[in-house]
Image (spheres, helix red, strand yellow):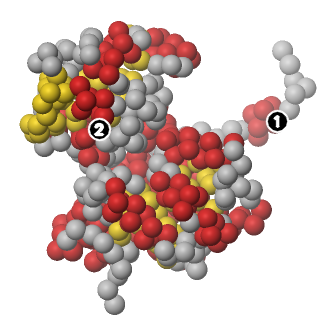
Amino acid sequence: MAVDSDVLDLSLATSGGLGVEWADRQMPVLRRIRERFEKERPLDGVTIAACLHVTTETANLMRTLKAGGADVALCASNPLSTQDHTAAALVDGYDIPVFAIRGVDESRYYGHIKAVLDRTPMITMDDGGDLVSTLHQQRTDQLPEIIGGTEETTTGVIRLRAMEARGLLGYPVISINGADTKHLFDNRYGTGQSAIDGIMRATNVLLAGKTVVVCGYGMCGRGVSARARGMGADVVVTEVDPTRALEAAMDGLRVLPGLDAASQGDIFVTVTGNKHVLRAKHFEVMKDGAILANAGHFDIEIDLNALRRMASGHRTVRREVEEYTLDDDRRLYVLAEGRLVNLAAAEGHPAAVMDMSFANQALSCEWLNANAASLEKRVYEVPEAIDKTVARLKLETMGVRIDELTSEQQEYLSGWEEGT
């Protein structure tokens, strides 16, 4: 029987399947979890609606959930992040319903979200909060059926905590982003490498000698800054948080207000999770030829509407590169329509770091199913035991060994009597 789906072209399934296999080789932690899930079936009878970037790494997460007994359906969490060949492979090769096509308009994008919600999920899996937001605004009748959810990224967690603070969150959600084995690696090393990769693929510019302005110095900003600096760029950081700004300064980076940085930058990368970080007043002073890229989740970090109003001309000059000509003949270049440059112009994070993020996702779904009855309607952190398990498994697959505390050391750390 054909799997219910909406993908671009099922004939792409063969190449997609090869990509899924390639990623799987670099995701040994998730593979171990999948092998256990196949034996124990901890998700039997559980329906999961997943709204994630449809990539080869995500495909292996879907395979793992299905191996655990879950009835899972997947839609995209960003209109430009879907790998169409991967979507086809999931449908044709793994019998997993997928509703995702790269480049869909807003109406069809949300139609895909509603399609996975039509499957009456018990667990939601989100990346950015669009699925949860749709549920709480348009499908409130479904909330009682849901035992819990997971959220992958910073932007989504921000939205969830706002809902929790207002008493609006309808079920417990685990912040995957809060796990050390997620944000210390996925956000920092994954975003750092993949954002630079997206900029390079889109533009082929030389970073050495350029001034790269990184807006935001959270884990993602730290990763982008480190990679740009390593390629010879002069890195400037803009921040609103004094502690993060101080850290950037002590990491040896220049820290400037956004308007001062705007006149100096050759390449701008936004990684804040907030809106209109780059806006009209910044565009007014930018250099001719400045390149603007966003590595935050939504396409709101760069105020594109303001740029369009200011522009006297617009054209696409390369794939994923749009040129905006201003009245004084300066030209600014926006990458990937202001959407996630690492996924729209490249392939997203390397599988080796997504291995840990998606291991947290799979184990958190198992934990939710086992503990749902005792949970409150709030945002939870990933249980420490899961976080440590993922780290331990990753080290094992890398062939890295570590020490263990002696009984004497354990006693000392648990006591208080012994002094100087």
Point out the tag, 1 or 2, that comes first from the N-terminus: 2
Q: Position of residue 107 (x, y in %)?
A: 35, 60
Q: Closer to the observer: label 1 or label 2? A: 2
Residue 218 vertical placement versus 288 (above, below): below
What amino acid type should be assigned to the residue bearing mark 2? Gly
Q: For residue 14, what is the image quadrant?
A: bottom left
Q: For residue 268, what is the image quadrant?
A: top left
In this view, the residue in front, 403 or 141, is: 141
* Local secondary structure at mark 1: helix
What residue lies at 38% left-to-right and 37% top-to-bottom?
300
In this view, the residue in front, 299 or 387, is: 299
In this view, the residue in front, 36 or 273, is: 273
Please tell me the numbered disc located at residue 414. Answer: 1
Density class for disc 2 (Cα within 10 Å; few <14, some 14-19, many ≥20) is many
Mark pair 1, 2: CA separation: 51 Å
Q: Is residue 59 left or right of residue 39?
A: left
Please tell me the numbered disc located at residue 116. Answer: none
Which quadrant, please, contains the N terminus? bottom left
Can residue 393 be seen from the camera position used here?
Answer: no
Which quadrant, please, contains the C terminus? top right
What residue lies at 58% left-to-right and 80% top-to-bottom?
45
* Local secondary structure at mark 2: helix
Residue 216 vertical placement versus 110 (above, below): above
What amino acid type should be assigned to the residue bearing mark 1? Ser
In this view, the residue in front, 398 or 327, is: 327
Residue 53 vertical placement versus 34 (above, below): above
